[in-house]
Image (cartoon, rainbow, N blue to C red):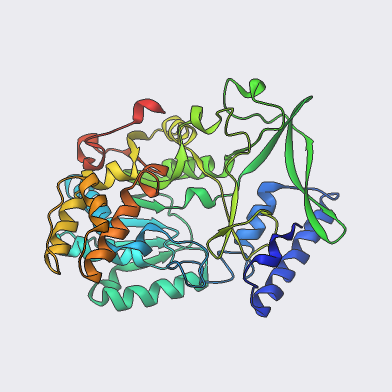
């Protein structure tokens, strides 16, 4: 374990106790596996072990900077994110005569509240809004959020622990794919090895074993010696399951990632795996299992190919900034700012981002700062991408990809 932990905010005693319990389970799994655990098995335990994992043992991860959260997602930044996304959801619901929205990993419930509220405002609130959630603590928090924000629509919300065998819906997954366990690969002089977890004294450490696995790129054997990268079998299996069960509808996934040729570029030789704790990136992703969020960027080419192989269409792929602008974010911002001092009607993303520094009231500054983060290329605007997959849906019903579609880059 490295020395960074000494400079980090100390976890609460109860959190450390929970982490110690999870660590004991991981050590038992190591013992059962002969002293070695594939990294995806470790990540599964760290994030999803019943009652102890990051997403199953607590509910305080989501929030604003400065709180006790570990990261901030787009719906936590501004309700404009969910309201804008709702414009795309509304288009598919209406043109496809669909009546259900399904959200995976709804976090605090804010995105669901934003989408439901805006769909109601647009006159197309769905009959059912289903949240697929494995965490009892998060389900409780989501219920509180939705009861408070949209009490008149609360009876339309359902909680599922798994997908039904067949369904028709608009599916939403905001920062869901990145939280699915990944396998780690390490390039040695002798070839590729699978990186897993072992124990050295009291610490968890990385250890490599021989494997037949390769990064899904023709240049796998040309990548530099020492390269560490990820492959995403669980995310691809998830897409295949979704394809098997989605009889008709569209799925929108928003996450950070790249097309395959960028993901496995020689300059990205340390991969994308990260652990987040109190808005800090940890040097040691094995530190405090269950208390830190572990994520990996998404290989969107692999997601698209898995979807197509399973019978889904790729309806669009673009940056978050392009998607939100296509869905009318700037119009919503103008309306929001017109309701408070000073009114403004930005005509472009550049003008809106520049407006962050303009004088004005706190309402104005909060709105423009949040939207600047959502759209700015150096923030979420370019790093985050949106991919739409579907069956029985006209691609022309996807306004979010009307301009700037990058499907050809996958």
Q: Is residue 115 visible?
A: yes
Q: How many marks?
A: 0
In front of the other: 117 or 258: 258
Task: Name the residue rendered at 26%, 62% in the picture.
Answer: 367
Quarter holding the C terminus is: top left
**Residue 76 percent location from the top left of the image:** 37, 64
Q: Is residue 232 above or below residue 43?
A: above
Q: Residue furthest right?
A: 201
Residue drawn at (21%, 41%), measured in percent from left and top?
399
Estimate the x, y position of residue 298 in percent, counting from the top left.
Answer: 50, 41
- Residue 107, given in percent of the width and then of the height, sits at 44, 64
Taking 186 as reference, is 139 above or below it? below
Residue 99: tell me if it is visible. no
Residue 184 x/y as whole percent: 67, 41
Placement of 331 over or under 340, stated as above or below: above
**Of 102 and 245, the residue lying toward us:** 102
């Amino acid at each position: 374990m490295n020395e960074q932990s000494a400079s980090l905010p100390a976890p609460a005693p109860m959190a450390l106790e929970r982490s110690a319990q999870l660590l004991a389970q991981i050590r038992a799994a190591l013992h059962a596996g002969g002293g070695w655990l594939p990294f995806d098995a470790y990540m599964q335990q760290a994030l999803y072990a019943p009652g102890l994992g990051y997403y199953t043992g607590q509910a305080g991860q989501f929030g604003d900077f400065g709180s006790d959260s570990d990261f901030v997602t787009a719906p936590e930044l501004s309700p404009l994110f969910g309201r804008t996304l709702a414009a795309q959801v509304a288009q598919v619901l209406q043109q496809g005569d669909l009546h259900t929205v399904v959200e995976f990993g709804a976090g605090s419930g804010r995105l669901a509240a934003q989408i439901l509220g805006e769909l109601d405002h647009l006159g197309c609130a769905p009959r059912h809004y289903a949240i697929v959630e494995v965490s009892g603590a998060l389900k409780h928090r989501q219920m509180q959020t939705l009861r408070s924000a949209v009490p008149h629509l609360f009876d339309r919300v359902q909680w599922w622990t798994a997908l039904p065998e067949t369904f028709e819906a608009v599916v939403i997954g905001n920062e869901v794919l990145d939280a699915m366990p990944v396998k780690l690969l390490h390039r040695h002089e002798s070839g590729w090895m699978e990186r897993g977890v072992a124990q050295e004294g009291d610490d968890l450490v990385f250890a490599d074993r021989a494997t037949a696995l390769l990064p899904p790129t023709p240049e796998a054997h040309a990548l530099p010696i020492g390269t560490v990268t990820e492959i995403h079998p669980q995310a691809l299996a998830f897409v295949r399951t979704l394809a098997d069960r989605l009889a008709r509808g569209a799925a929108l996934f928003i996450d950070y990632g790249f097309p395959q040729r960028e993901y496995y570029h020689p300059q990205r030789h340390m991969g994308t795996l990260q652990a987040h704790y109190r808005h800090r990136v940890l040097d040691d992703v094995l530190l405090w299992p269950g208390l830190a969020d572990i994520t990996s960027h998404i290989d969107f080419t692999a997601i698209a190919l898995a979807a197509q192989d399973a019978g889904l269409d790729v309806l669009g792929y673009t940056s978050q900034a392009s998607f939100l602008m296509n869905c009318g974010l700037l119009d919503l911002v103008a309306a929001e700012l017109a309701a408070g001092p000073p009114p403004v009607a930005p005509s472009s993303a550049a003008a809106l981002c520049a407006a962050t520094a303009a004088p004005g009231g706190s309402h104005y500054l909060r709105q423009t700062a949040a939207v600047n983060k959502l759209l700015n290329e150096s923030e979420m605007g370019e790093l985050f991408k949106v991919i739409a997959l579907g069956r029985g849906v006209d691609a022309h019903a996807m306004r979010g990809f009307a301009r700037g579609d990058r499907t050809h880059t996958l």
